[in-house]
Image (cartoon, rainbow, N blue to C red):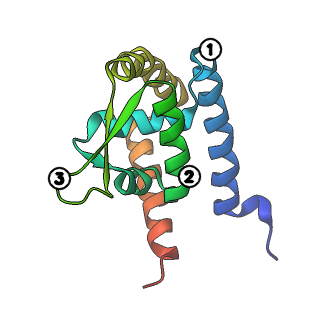
Amino acid sequence: MFNLDDCLAFITNKRSKLLAEALENEFRPYQITRSQWIAMFFIFNYDALTQKELADKMGIKEPSVVRLIQKLELSGLLHRSETLEDKRIKQLQLSSKGVNVYHELLPIAENFKKHTVQGISEEDLQTFKHVLETMTKNTIKE
């Protein structure tokens, strides 16, 4: 008989939400959301990232990423510029303020990660990642 409490998709989703909420709480004093920081991470670490590419990396839909970008832009943390090839495509770049905020929050993210994996061996972490990847591949229909 099916038991939702034993369903790995349900378990991982529930735990993922708890971890996301905990990281959100870490960033709250800085008036940055977890999603904003994740966007800043990708923009900082990938040159000439477009809105579509950011949406893909974050695993969210383009309309959601547009709203996220607008908030970051209004806060003075990033700016958009047109590409030479197609003026409809916007490239994203952190402003100097955005770079400073990113670097200020990076140790918080690093400490959060360190704290969440405390007591878990590297081998177990790799196994966990492998299992999640396999489950994901198993659900994708081609």
Which residue is label 2 attached to? 64
Query: Farthest bottom residue?
Result: 142
> 96 and 133: which one is in front?
96
Of the numbered discs 3 and 1, the one sitting upstream in the chain is 1
Of the numbered discs 2 and 1, the one sitting upstream in the chain is 1
Q: Residues within 10 Å of mark 3 (few under 14, many from 20)?
A: few
Asked if residue 24 lies left or right of residue 59, the reply is right
Which amino acid, by three-letter code, is at mark 1?
Pro
Q: Position of residue 89 (x, y in %)?
A: 31, 56
Mark 1, secondary structure of its residue: helix
Which residue is label 1 attached to? 29
Inter-mark Cα distance, 3 to 1: 39 Å
Which amino acid, by three-letter code, is at mark 3?
Leu
Q: Is residue 94 above or below residue 99?
A: below
Please name the residue shown 47% across and 41% down the image.
69
Asked whether residue 120 is in view, the answer is no
Please name the residue shown 50% across and 49% down the image.
66
Inter-mark Cα distance, 2 to 1: 23 Å
Mark 3, secondary structure of its residue: loop
Please name the residue shown 48% across and 56% down the image.
59
User: Looking at the rendering, in which quadrant would you find the N terminus?
Assistant: bottom right
* Mark 2 vs mark 1: in front: 2
Which residue is label 3 attached to? 84
User: Looking at the rendering, in which quadrant would you find the C terminus?
Assistant: bottom left
Q: Position of residue 113 (x, y in %)?
A: 48, 28
* Mark 3 vs mark 1: in front: 3
Mark 2, secondary structure of its residue: helix
